[in-house]
Amino acid sequence: MSDDVREEEFSIHWIQDVVDSVQERDATEYLISTGKSPSASIHIGIMRELIISDVIKRELHNRGKPARTMFVVDDYDPIRSFPKSISLSIDEWAGIPYSDIPDEFGCCESFGAHWAKELVDTFPDFGIDHEVVYTSTLYENPEMIDAVRICLRKTETIRKIMIEFVGSGFGEEQRKQYAESMKTWYPASVICSECGRLQAGTKGEITPNRVTDYNAEDDLVSYTCQHCGHSETVPLDSVRVKLVWRVDWPAKWYVLGVTCEPAGKDHSVKGGSYDTGLEISKKVFGWAGPVKVPYEWVRIGGRDMSTSGGIVFIPRTWESIAPPELYRFIMIRTNLSRGYDIHPEMLPDMIDGYERFERVFYGLEDADESQRELAKIIYPLTTAEPPSEEYQPKLPFKFAVVTSQLEDVLGREAVLARSEEVLKKLSGLDIVTPKMQSMIEKRLWRARNWVTEFGPARERISIPETVPDDIKSTFTDQDRQFLAKLVDVLRSTEMDDDELQAAVFDAARSVELKERRAFVVLYRILISTKSGPRLAPFINTLGRGWVADRIASVL
């Protein structure tokens, strides 16, 4: 067994371990929740969390347990900065919840809804069917207001928890100062009824409209807006209020009945926001809280992704260059304690590897018993829908990379026809079904997008309308003798790729031209470079007649 297979087998133990822990809750219905703040385009790192929760749900279903998944959009958070793509003024909108800021693109009801939709629209492709809940709507529910009321009434308990958990990383003097500041602190802020802000200031200079007093007997909250100065004391259920982050999270767990929630390492560190939430769950809401499932981050090209920092690679981008099933495969086989670094330039090899794994599942690839068993467990978890009974053959991605770039020269119909011809030959097909045709078109689209946006220069093909004069002038008499013989061969008979490759060698040998030189000459005629895609398939894709005419133009 290879080291890669051993690593996969080791890594997938997280599925069994996590599902066992979740099932111990013995819930009437298991709810696996995830969430994200829609401050701009949401990067693909969130998909790890969504896929983890989806896998847990699927495995619970396999055990006959009722389970569902939820994605909470934290659109009630206040804006601190805008992405560069937004023309709205931060001075005008700072401190206002995402849900109250207009969508300047005009497609959604709010700024927060716009960025949430960009992500949610990709859910079906990635096999995600989470129920979507908006925090701004959740806070309109009586159950959530009751949770806020509980927190305000147990403020002293929450203060002690915050001092214990937040203050644990402070030095002695700083801890004393923090404890002193918490004496008048309340775990909620109010959206000002005059200016609509939850806080004043922008990144680095933020002051929240914290509740300054709570009268439990009359259920009255007092606050002063830090932006406009408006002050009032009003009934709790007549004002828009939001719990602070470390309290808001466990309150939502309690109200929604969350059984399990995966979370990234930033929230899952010992004593972090997740542990704080679990302590609040126990001492304020009187229950254990959800099963904690920590995971490492997904990175891009060696860098941490950050919406606020502008380092973003979104699910829609992945879907445009590679199968979503591949991303699910990577996330499932990677142990939760390990990060994953996306290198888009490596996608062709990764796609080939996943599709070999797929063929193992269908019994079409040589594999030992352990590999077959692994495929039985993992492959169904990688697909958006249950696997089809029969394998659907696929056009090799690397072939699609080359072929997709020839559409401007050959036309779309010729490229599709060549792709169908190759699929038939490789898969032993008599016909290409409409479904296969659709898959070919999507593969060509993704391959073209990949090579255009992420492919290395050596993978990019550009065919000039004519062979440049400065290239023609480099050909020797021996080169031209070789080319003349090859033109005759290309126009004489049909040849498959192997036969054509042999014919190029034979033509070169017949004039005593070195084979390497022969290839350089042909690549320079075709694409003005000294190397390129595998020559015979490339010539057959371009069409032997077209290539013969191209060569003849230099003789």
Image (spheres, helix red, strand yellow):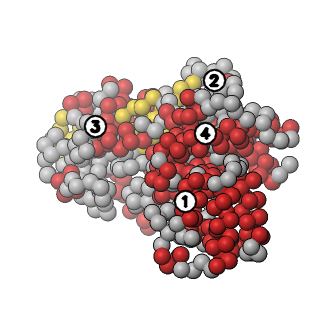
Q: Looking at the rendering, which quadrant does residue 153 occupy?
A: top left
Q: Are marks 1 and 3 in contact (CB under 8 Å)?
A: no
Whether residue 275 is visible here, answered yes or no, is no
Q: Which mark is residue 108?
A: 3
Q: Are marks 1 and 4 in contact (CB under 8 Å)?
A: no
Left or right? Give the position of 1 relative to 345: right
Mark in the foreground, 2 or 4: 4
Query: Which element carries disc 3, helix, strand or loop?
Result: loop
Residue that label 2 marks: 61
Please name the amino acid that badge 3 sits on: Cys
Query: Which element carries disc 4, helix, strand or loop?
Result: helix
How many angstroms separate mark 1 from mark 2 (CA)?
61 Å
Q: Earlier in the sequence, mark 2 or mark 4?
A: 2
Q: Earlier in the sequence, mark 3 or mark 2?
A: 2
Residue that label 4 marks: 420
Q: Residue at x 53, y 50 (%)?
A: 404
Q: Residue at x 31, y 35 (%)?
A: 136
Query: Which element carries disc 2, helix, strand or loop?
Result: helix
Residue 210 is situated, as x and y percent measured from the top left of the image, at: 27, 47
